[in-house]
Amino acid sequence: MKTTKKIAAVLAVFLVLALFAGAASAVPTPGDTVYVYQFDGSGDSGVATYYLYESGFAVATVSTDATGTFTGLTIKEGIYGDTPTATAATVYFTLKYPAVAVEAYKAGTGTSIVGGTVLKTQKIDLSVSGTNGLTYGLKFTTPAGGSTTEFGKSAVAPFGVLDFANSITTFVPADLSNIDISDVATGEWTVKADLKYTGIVGQMAVTTPSKYLTSPAIKFTVGAPVTESISINKEKITRGGSILVTITGTPSTAVRVNVDNLGFVDLAGQSGIRFQAYDATTGYITAFTADLSSSGTRTLQFDSNTKPLLIDAEDTTYNFAAAFPTVTKKAKVAVEKGAVTVKTSQDAYFIGNDMTISGTNTESEVVYLFIKGANVDVQGITGYSGATPIAVESDDTWKVTFNTRTILGALDTGTYTIYAAASTAVAPFAFDKDSVYETTSVALKQPFLTATAASSTVAQGDKIKITGTAEAATQVMYYVFGTNKFVSGTISVEDDGAYSKEIVTDTFSAGQYFVVIQHPMYDTLFNIGPSTVAYGGKLAPAPGSSNIWQNTELAYNDPAGALAPISGLSLLFNTAERQSANAAEALCQAIDSQNIDDIYVKLTFIVAQPTITLNSVSDVTKGSALKVSGTTNLKEGTVVTVDVLSTAFTAVDKTAVSSASFITLTTKVVKGADGVNTWEVTFDTTGLNVDTYTIRAVTDDLTTSTTVKVLEAAPTATATATATKTATATATATATPTKTPGFGAFLALAGLGAVAVLVLRRD
């Protein structure tokens, strides 16, 4: 029998066939392996029985056929010997079924290329295991689908084409190493190993099932020769932009790349890059190693100008140099200076209002804001310069909104220049005239205050509405001074600066009242104001009055002065101790003080007794329009009921709203000038009888009346016919009420009483 040698996984060394042909009849030695279906594997060349040992005892037997070959699909693999007792065996060996495998590697590396790619410029190793020293060959399926045993060229002279047919003369084990594949077709190759089965010693039996003859197939791709290169996806970018650098070369190799200028950093977290070198001062990358993939490429992202304080803002060309084994290749990109734009949402702002500044920046990732004005050199805007610049969005836009009083409160009114810069000088972050920047102008204005009363006169009990504009304020203070009367409070200001307040006059006596509206101005504090509690070391004022305090340094009611006087605090007056006009004037003079920044406006209004009047009414002819109007100081929208009632002795159905002797209409008061409002109704007299009528205007509390006559129209031919038709129609449509003896006289007396009273006040 032949002697079997184990084949190594990589760079296997095989015995030439002559060696194991000479040992074909040798008895297996301890540790040898015999395959089921290996021709004359027992070396007996005939029938023989062998025993399966487990734990030193024979548990089963198997017999060879007439050729000395173990055959069958149910043989149990294990250690077999030639006697029933293991200790007495003179021959024992491992019997198992064939299991051939093939593997492919990059030459000399042990790195598998199965499922991967190898370039034509590279060499490969093939490894076959599980042959058990038997004759085998290799079959290759080409990228085109053909089948061949030839593949590559020998690495030794005469460097011929290798034929891996399963014969004893085509190849030797050394042919499996360092195979030159430069001439093979590019594409995917498939390889499998086949055991020869012609039925001679050193081969498999002719009856061997096919599944024991062929190894599983492996695949790998042969790629075209790679042209070593480095490329950048853009020829030029605006500073602040990004580039993609692609290095192409031998698959799964490392390439060192150097960058000749400072200004780029590698994108954090990307794979395939290592050993980065950075400039110690700026932090920008100067070199890196790119690990090429199994396909021979690597693409990496680099971002420019992420540290704007540390680079020159001028245009710069950058060279990326890739050091390949035999050559250095370069790629370059031009980085151009970016641009910054800036604008404000308005041309001017009241100090205290919010200012919005926005723009774009293609130069850097941040924007620094500076301001310059009369006697103010360029200085950073607090919170948006220095170490806290504005971040630029991914679409290159930026925007910020801040309160002008909070951020720019120390600046006077006037016109200023806003600078938006892409970078600054190194700390303390001063403005750098060489940086990329843009400017815009904006005016800061003093807040103003307006106030208007809806009318100069208001009826007692109605509301007086005061409206106005208070720029750059969230609230204003109001004061109302009258004879033995003082009212005050705050009014909220809307975002657009508008405010309004309705003051109820139910408790106001008739007379003149003085109103002061106060704006807190720049410091947002009311430096003057009323207090009804103990403060500043003073007792609480008498009920119904207030102490007017002034504080030139803090708010008039700052908690610091709750128990004792504090610096800047003074008591101006008590409202009960000043006449109405004098108190209002004293307040205005105090607010005029240059020691505080509050401003004010003043106005007056009159509270009058409620009145309603009827304008003169002329007699009308039947069928004409009867227009009734009047004036009142009642508020706009008040409902006025106007009755037209015949003075004739005719009873009226109490459920009726109109008849031949009675009509009622309602209207609403319309706003007039200077508190003199108006009202008006128009009656159709077509259905009225010719008679004398009382016209009465009534509100909830007031009544006024007058009389008017409805006359017969002058007769004409046409008019007579028309009048007849109208009279007939009226007579048909309206039934004449039945007179009640004695009730008409009561109505007549009531009518005369109504005419006699022009204005009645209802209690």
Image (tube, grey):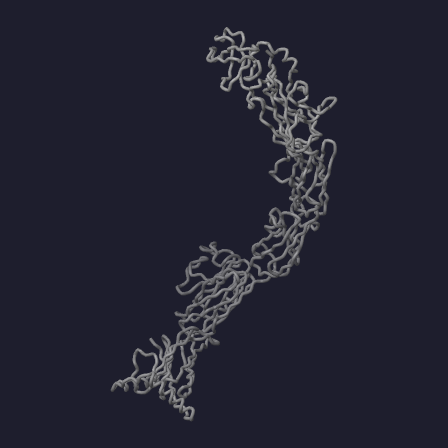
Total residue callouts: 0
**Whole-percent x and y of residue 514?**
47, 70
Q: Is residue 684 above or below residue 72?
A: below
The quadrant of the picture occupied by the N terminus is top right
Question: Could you tell whether 425 is left or right of 733 in the image?
Answer: right
Q: In this view of the protein, can residue 421 be seen by the observer?
A: yes
Front position in the image: 92 or 63 = 63
**Whole-percent x and y of residue 340?**
66, 52
**Whole-percent x and y of residue 657?**
34, 79
Can you tell which quarter of the image residue 546 is in? bottom left
The quadrant of the picture occupied by the C terminus is bottom left
Front position in the image: 60 or 556 = 60
Residue ID at (54%, 19%): 97
Q: Is residue 339 above or below residue 657?
A: above
Q: In this view of the protein, can residue 275 be seen by the observer?
A: no
**Whole-percent x and y of residue 471?**
54, 62
Front position in the image: 46 or 271 = 46
Front position in the image: 754 or 199 = 199
Q: Residue furthest left?
A: 741
Question: Could you tell whether 317 is left or right of 682 in the image?
Answer: right
Can you tell which quarter of the image residue 253 is in? top right
Question: Could you tell whether 550 is left or right of 612 in the image?
Answer: right
